[in-house]
Image: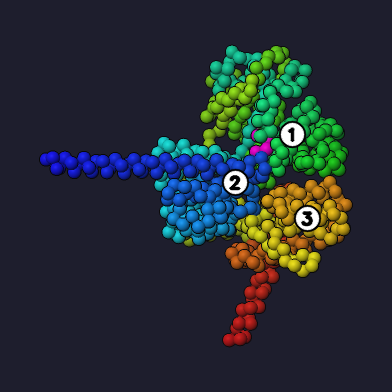
Amino acid sequence: MALSFAVVASSSSIMCKAINANNHSHLQDLSYIKRAALISDKSAGFTSPHPNFGCVIVTPSVEVVGEGYLYAQGTKPAEVLAVEAAGERCRGATAYVNMEPGDCHGDDTAVSALVQAGITRAVIGMRHPLQHLRGNAIRALRSQGLQVDVLGEDMQSKLVEEARKACLLVNLPFVHRAASRVPFSVLKYAMTLDAVKYMGHFRRCFLDGIGKIAASSGHAAWISSKLSRNRVFELRGRSDAIIVGGNTVRRDNPRLTARHGGGHMPIRIVLSQSLDLPEEANLWDLSDVSTVVVTQRGARRGFQRYLASKGVEVVEFDILNPRDVMEYFHDRGYLSILWECGGTLAASAISSGVIHKVFAFVAPKIIGGKNAPSPVGELGMVEMSQALDLIDVCFEQIGPDMLISGFLQPIPDLTPTIPSEDETFAIDPTVAPFETSIIFFYKTWDLYGAFSNFSPHPIQMPDEDGNYVTWFSVEHYYQANKFIGVSNPLAQDCIDKIKSAKSPEEAARMGRLTQRRQPHLVRSDWESVKIDVMYRALKCKFSIYPHLNSMLLSTAGSVLVEASPHDLFWGGGRDGEGLNYLGRLLMKLRSEFLGESSAASENTCIAL
């Protein structure tokens, strides 16, 4: 009996040790996944828009040997950077990624990097939100023999859900893009503490117009503290665009700059139905960042021409409402919008269902005045039971102010997993993945995103002396060519800066800004040669990457359209009015490749 008891005790001890070890390993997995989510956000304020990818590589001895994050659209994947940092220590290691790899459709660089480096296990925080990318990398990694654990599927617990939520939150704008046709929108305002008696019920009554966002005269300068305003600049830097209404332009004459010293500056958008706007305004100064004015069709044609002469883009809608406007900017590729508008426009946006989160800065001030404007206008609610509840409310003290934030809409549920088009085709071959005769492409993460001139595919092109030079992307090469051959040191300096730009987005911003500010640096024949410049760069790209060549040839018989709704030269435009030169050049290139293929086949037949 004593011996038997000893054996049982020993078995229990072994079992307990195994359970503790598993729990410890489980907690380590979640810790590293959260770390991947954290570093994926490092480019915030510097580049946008793009999904946030982070990768952490950990050895069996539990040592972090490599980390990486996607810096911008069209740059090296996070997984590649992490593998490069880890080197040979990748062998037998585990890769932790906050989201399933897939920042450029048609490109498997991230998966190949993990496989070739010798990674044996991958822990993934969430599947890719976009249908055409969802599950692809997971299947590819498993087919190569890697153990792949996906949070919420292969790993389940309350702690797992918390880690998965961290992965969802860091890519919330991207998740919303996948789930709806509007960007993730945040309403921000600062207000006074006039209605302090209601603050205990803040979650229900903040949308009833308590507090004041300005004096009864309309004066609203610096309600909140400097620390709160710094947080606002951070919010701006994380956004693709900032929206205000006509009243804000008339009363405050804002600049709406991020003022963070980073590279990314959000586009400024003005919504005005009547276009009753001043001729002189800070927003018409485009030296640092562009402005888009959205209005009702036919409003003040003369003023529209005036804005156009200043370089301000004007977009007309038959009926101006927030949802249609947000769907339009969704089509432009924007992921996140910050609303800094007054109460009337805020109420309209909330009623239209386009506001997802609220940031309310409450200052310990009282200003009074029954006619003072409130943060949210009339919503048609007459009882407290009709008030909108915030979800996941957070309270944070910032200096003397209180920041209250929460969601107006729940995080979209991406489960159950909807099969990708390829998976659907595998299940039912009668459903062809691409039946349409028109193929649209725009952002690199879109279907056929690799067709974009912003895709992460370096090219080698000859310089003026015939020497081959490597460019990080087609866009780098295209922007630099605006200034090639100009006998001015500033032009050469601009070329060098574009060439070393970290991302296609930054190269485009440098080129466009210099072209706008210093047009004398642009080569005199640019308008006549720019199409040829783009074509040569595209031909190089699709010649040196076999998988891109195959993808292009697979579209034979389809019309290719660059789906930018605002670029009427390279894109197809909002209503098909664009010239679509990028799509045309790709179709011309496709025909050239198909002709070469046919000629090669004929020569082979003759030889036989």
Quarter of the figure with residue 343: top right
Along the polypeptide, which appears first: circle 3 or circle 1?
1
Query: Magenta: predominant secondary structure element?
Result: helix
Three-letter amino acid code at the position of disc 3: Ile
Q: Which residue is drawn at 77% across and 33% down?
A: 255
Mark 2 and mark 3 residues within 8 Å of each other at the beta carbon? no
Mark 3 and mark 1 residues within 8 Å of each other at the beta carbon? no
Q: In x, y percent, where is residue 578?
A: 75, 53
Quarter of the figure with residue 466: bottom right
Of the pair 250 and 516, the residue shown nearer to us:
516
Q: How crowded is mark 1: few (under 14 residues within 10 Å), some or many (20 or more)?
A: many
Three-letter amino acid code at the position of disc 2: Pro
Q: Which residue is drawn at 81% across and 41% down?
A: 287
Instruction: Identify the secondary structure beneath mark 2.
Output: loop
Q: Which residue is drawn at 56% across and 22% down?
A: 204
Q: In x, y percent, where is residue 30?
A: 45, 41
The residue indicated by pointer 1 is 256
Q: How crowded is mark 3: few (under 14 residues within 10 Å), some or many (20 or more)?
A: many
Report the coloring of the rendering.
rainbow
Specify start and end residues of the magenta stretch as a single range.
Answer: 235-239
In the image, which is nearer the foreground, mark 3 or mark 1? 3
Q: Is residue 475 magenta?
A: no
Instruction: Identify the secondary structure beneath mark 3.
Output: helix
Direction from residue 31 to residue 78 in the image, left or right? right
Q: In x, y percent, where is residue 301?
A: 84, 39
The residue indicated by pointer 2 is 51
Q: In x, y percent, where is residue 209?
A: 64, 20
The residue indicated by pointer 3 is 495
Three-letter amino acid code at the position of disc 1: Leu
